[in-house]
Amino acid sequence: MKKALITGISGQDGSYLAEYLLDLGYEVHGIIRRSSVAENQDSRIAHLNDKIYTYYGDMLDTASLTSIMLKVQPDEIYNLAAMSHVRISFDIPSFTIQTNGLAVLNLLEVYRLFAPNAKFYQASSSEMFGNSVDDDGIQRLTTPMTPVSPYGCAKLLAFNLVRHYRHAYGLHACNGILFNHESPRRGSNFVTNKVVKAAVEIKKGLRDKLELGNLDSYRDWGHSKDYVRAMHKIINHDVADEWIVSTGETWSVRDLVEYVFSKLDMDWKDYVVQNPKFMRPEELKYLKGDSQRSRDTLGWEPEYTFHSMLDEMIENWMNKL
Ligand code: F7E
């Protein structure tokens, strides 16, 4: 039985990955951070409590990472822990750089010293590209990386460290450059779930407006469930490498809002207002990723479309509220 260690197991991706690996017969271990509201700690993985092993730890506490690594002796390490909100990274830039950047160095050291035969997956991000895009309007592995947020800068540091550790120490350390990915488990301060939740609340008479930031940015949105399958394929490919995971389609925030409100028989223009509070000091305007190599070499394909993903999220809030 293979053992997997997942940092960030209580997050959207961590919870779906845990389910996926359990189905494949893995023994699944995960690290969770202490929260003063106990329910917030494990709401996404509570249903797995008797199937997985969890440990308190923190990316900023190298001693905790060392003791967990020694105890678990994993075959596969998935580093999904991060301060994942791009706009908030402008408010807490130093914490973001430490958690998403420097702490990855500490985790790589712990991996190199205490579990060097394991395979390592790093959750890298399309935010690393910033506003770079090839002439054909697509980001690929060769597109320059010029991040436009503390979050993107930290992720780029971690990306380079992972590559460096692979080359310097012969470790099986890989980077998955994942474009945006959503689901009913997405935090409701990310734009997809924020829009869906608010639209359903308006439909049910629980509120009357929705405040958003920039409606003119474009994202390549996939489904988290599809993307965790890609993580497993990436880490288990013979050669450790860098991979792009994306749908290859791009939609604007306006397209997203229009679709969700019209699905609920409403006109978004009657309810959506812009609030500068939700704008970023520097915005990444456009993402569309080329994942052809991942599809051809790893045999990965997404199952959800942008619309079927949003339909699932709408249904989730219709049932919940
Ligand atoms: O914003 C715009 C916002 O916060 C998407 C993370 O998973 O993907 C995610 O980062 C777009 C941006 O995701 C609001 O300005 C407008 O253009 O949902 P988001 P993100 O920043 O793209 C990457 C790949 C990651 O790695 C990250 O961890 O929507 N937008 N109005 C808004 N965004 C938010 N959050 N809230 C608004 O009110």
Image (cartoon, rainbow, N blue to C red):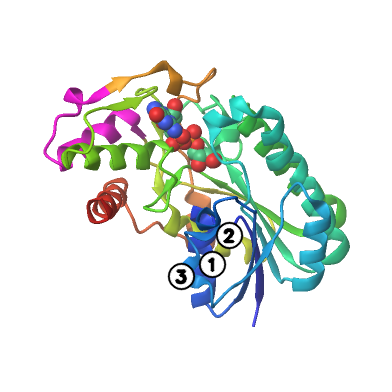
Q: Position of residue 31 (x, y in %)?
A: 66, 60
Q: Determine which residue is flagged by label 2.
A: 9
Magenta residue span:
251-272
Q: Residue at x 24, y 40 (%)?
A: 201
Q: Determine which residue is flagged by label 1.
A: 18
The answer to whether residue 6 is left or right of residue 307 is: right
Q: Residue at x 24, y 54 (%)?
A: 315
Q: Is residue 170 visible?
A: no
Mark 2 or mark 1: whose residue is earlier in sequence = 2
Helix, strand or loop at label 2? It is: loop
Disc 1 crowd rating (10 Å Cα; few below 14, some 14-19, many 20+) is many
Q: What residue type is labelled 2?
A: Ile
Disc 3 crowd rating (10 Å Cα; few below 14, some 14-19, many 20+) is few
How many labels sit on residues? 3
As measured in the structure, the alpha-carbon distance from the residue carrying label 1 to the one carrying label 3 is 11 Å
The answer to whether residue 109 is left or right of residue 177 is: right
**Do the CB atoms of the residues marked 1 and 3 lie less than 8 Å apart?**
no
Q: What residue type is labelled 3?
A: His
As measured in the structure, the alpha-carbon distance from the residue carrying label 2 to the one carrying label 1 is 7 Å
Q: Determine which residue is flagged by label 3.
A: 47
As measured in the structure, the alpha-carbon distance from the residue carrying label 2 to the one carrying label 3 is 13 Å
Q: Which residue is drawn at 35% across and 25% down?
A: 212
The main secondary structure of the magenta stretch is: helix
